[in-house]
Structures are given as structure tokens and as C-alpha cells.
């Protein structure tokens, strides 16, 4: 596929937040291929994005977990959960964290 500057910028923006190592590697390979010849095969990046973007239900489960409460505190965990419930009611399908949000934006650009 022909890689646009807009897509490159969106991928670079995604890489400014925490994403797993496999997604980072797939994104960096895609960018390297694009920079070499202006084109890159998006298949591996699309597969990794689909594998790594969490659902809104995963987000809600995390927000209620002891791990989240220990990491973020009771109040922040409660606020995250409430935001997730509202987002789900409004139709959100994916996690609200910055990594998943930005990854979802990249996926939308790649598959439309």
C-alpha cells in the first residue's frame, strides 16, 4: 500500500504512548518499509493491532481489578470504571487507555 504522511504521523503518535513490544516492533517495521520505498505491506501491522486492542469489557474488568486499584488507587479505578460504563453505553467497543485508543485510530486508517 502507498503510505501517506498522515498515516506515518498517526503511527508515530501511537508510539508515543505505551503499547506492547510486539505492536511497537510491527509499527517500526512498517515505518521502516514505508521510509525505504514509500510503500509497505500493512498485513502484519493490522494483525498485531487486532490482536492487541482490548475490548471495552476488558477495560471494565481491569478498572475493577485489585491490580488497577493498587496501581492507580481506589478513586482513580472507580473513575476509570465509570468512564468505561458511560463509553460502553455510548457504543464504545474498545478500551479507553491511550495505547488502545491510538492503536484503534491507526487500525481505522488502515482498514477504513
Image (cartoon, rainbow, N blue to C red):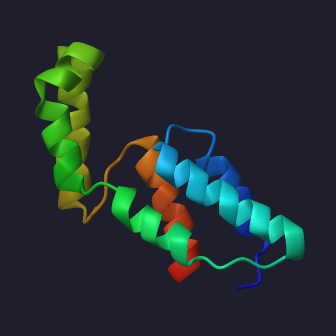
Residue 79 in view of the camera: yes
Identified at 52% across, 63% down, the residue is 105
Q: In this view, does 95 lie to the left or right of 68?
A: right
Q: Is residue 15 above or below residue 111?
A: above
Q: Is residue 10 above or below residue 37?
A: above
Q: Where is residue 47 in the image (x, y as percent from the top left)?
A: 44, 71
Residue 5 in view of the camera: no
Q: How many numbered marks have been drawn onto this rendered protein structure?
A: 0
Q: Position of residue 12 (x, y in %)?
A: 69, 51
Identified at 56% across, 65% down, the residue is 106
Q: Is residue 54 above or below residue 5?
A: above
Identified at 45% across, 63% down, the residue is 49
Q: In which quarter of the image is residue 78?
A: top left
Q: Position of residue 61 (x, y in %)?
A: 13, 41
Is the N terminus in the top left, top right, bottom left or bottom right quadrant? bottom right
Q: Is residue 44 left or right of residue 47?
A: right
Q: Is residue 97 left or right of residue 36?
A: left
Identified at 25% across, 34% down, the residue is 80
Foreground residue, 40 or 82?
A: 40
Q: In this view, does 32 lie to the left or right of 75?
A: right
Q: Position of residue 79 (x, y in %)?
A: 24, 29
Q: Quadrant of residue 11?
A: bottom right
Foreground residue, 112 or 35?
A: 35
Amino acid at each position: 500500500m502507498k503510505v501517506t504522511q498522515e498515516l506515518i504521523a498517526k503511527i508515530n503518535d501511537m508510539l508515543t504512548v505505551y503499547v506492547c513490544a510486539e505492536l511497537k516492533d510491527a509499527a517500526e517495521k512498517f515505518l521502516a518499509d514505508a521510509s525505504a520505498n514509500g510503500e509497505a505491506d500493512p498485513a502484519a501491522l493490522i494483525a498485531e493491532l487486532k490482536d492487541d486492542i482490548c475490548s471495552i469489557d476488558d477495560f471494565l474488568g481491569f478498572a475493577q481489578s485489585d491490580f488497577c486499584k493498587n496501581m492507580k488507587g481506589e478513586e482513580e479505578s472507580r473513575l476509570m470504571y465509570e468512564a468505561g460504563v458511560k463509553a460502553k453505553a455510548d457504543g464504545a467497543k474498545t478500551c479507553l487507555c491511550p495505547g488502545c485508543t491510538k492503536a484503534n485510530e491507526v487500525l481505522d486508517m488502515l482498514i477504513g
